[in-house]
Image (cartoon, rainbow, N blue to C red):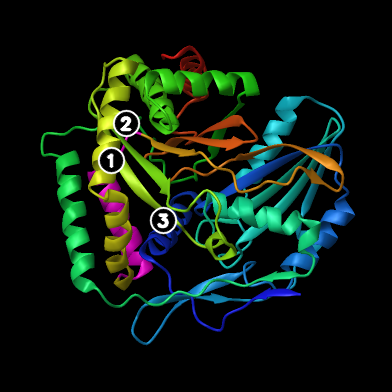
Amino acid sequence: MTIIKTSNRYYLNGIDWVMAALNMLNIKRTGIGNHSQLVLVLKGYLDQDYLGQRLSLILSKSPFLKGRVKRAWHLAPYWISEQQSFDSKDMRFFKITSGGKKDLDSIIQDCARTPFKDDKTLLDFDLIHFKKQTYLIMRFDHKMFDARGAEALLEYILDKQNHYKEYNLPSQGANLHSWKSRFLSGQCINRFLRSIYSKKTKVVSLKQNNNKEQFSAHNFYYTTFSNEQTRTIDDNTINSAGYLMNGVYILSIVAKAFDSLFKKHKYTGKILIPINVDVREAKFNNEKIFFNNLSFMLFKLKQGLSTKEYIKILKTQFIDQIKNKIPFHFINASLLMRIMPLKTLAFYMNLRMKKKPCSFSFSYIAEQAFNLTHIQNLEVVNLFHMPLVPINPGVGVFFTRFNNKLNMIISSYENTLTEKDGKFLQEKIISGTINGKA
């Protein structure tokens, strides 16, 4: 038996603490926390009883099904797991015997909008059978998992060779040292943000309907690019942006699509784009599955430029931020945020996002962490993500790769992006990435 165990605590890093605050903020505003879901597509029907037994075997008494945060005597927050048996009855099952893809999409989106039964639960599962295909859904809480970590966990759960493996959470010290380094990183981030948000900077964004009487629903627009289309996009990247610049190329197309949408509504200002940066290697060990192994970058663009000009500006800003270690400084400085209670940090973040808004969120994950080809002799067809976009800016575009295919999700609140505008963006981005311009 292979056992990965430690008696040491895992003290949350600064990004973990920010994610926990964002979760609280989202719940207050929408009734749903900061979570995402994976959708694994299989050829054929995965047996419901088998899956229920598998989940019960792997998740019961596991340290990553439920948990909460507690502060130590020195005030650093750490994670407490609550081991509990997994009840297979908690897994919902849908069998679509009539209707078309709209019915399937409706159920998948309803699953994405389903909150966890309590704030301690970190994982939920749904199973859908539709036209000789299985859609296995795993919702995960960003307090403990990021996108690639969740993929790796799903592989561990479904890999029959892991029957005798036991995964425990990693240990991490409180990091109550190197204060000078943290404050210097904080100064670096403040200077960076001041350069982005000058006094004259007006940020363009889609208008939100702040109706506090009812929670806002989330909407998704999903696209899978074929292998041929993905190869075309990769070729366009090399020709237009250069080797390993897929994220820059795709972001330039997305920015141009939003620029067209803003122009359509006669909204003006600078385009501000925050992006997530996965700081792990292409392959990572078991300890890196859990919690948030990411940082951030921020890009600023003018409206009305060509795709070629957006590529040039984004490349320059990307290289400058890497050179100046902006992702590292975000990680290092955010450790100072942990002294703030979550309610206070959530309130502060909400004020900050209102005062210094963004135009849309963006993410491009180049490496997959789920690599199984078959589950119970059923071929794995695809794996895509459906994240709930943060309440501000209320709309985001997220790209992932799986088996040489690109997947794209446009995620929004219904009061931020109308169905008409959502389809407009979707068509613009699809056309732009394949044809080389939006």
- Image quadrant where residue 402 sits: top right
Q: Residue at x 78, y 24 (%)?
A: 100
Mark 1 in CB contact with mark 3 (< 8 angstroms): no
Magenta span contains residue 225: no
Crowding at label 1, few (<14), some or many (≥20) Cα neighbours within 10 Å? many
Which callout, 1 or 3, points at the residue further toward the start of the chain? 3
Q: Which residue is mark 3?
A: 22
Crowding at label 2, few (<14), some or many (≥20) Cα neighbours within 10 Å? many
Instruction: State left or right for residue 152 relative to residue 377.
Output: left
Mark 2 in CB contact with mark 3 (< 8 angstroms): no
Q: Is residue 382 above or below residue 328?
A: above
**Residue type beneath disc 3:** Leu
**Residue type beneath disc 2:** Ser
Task: Find the magenta span and give its range.
Answer: 340-359
Instruction: State left or right for residue 370 relative to residue 256.
Output: right
Mark 2 in CB contact with mark 1 (< 8 angstroms): yes
**Residue type beneath disc 1:** Pro
Q: Which residue is mark 1?
A: 357
* Residue occupying the far front of the picture: 243
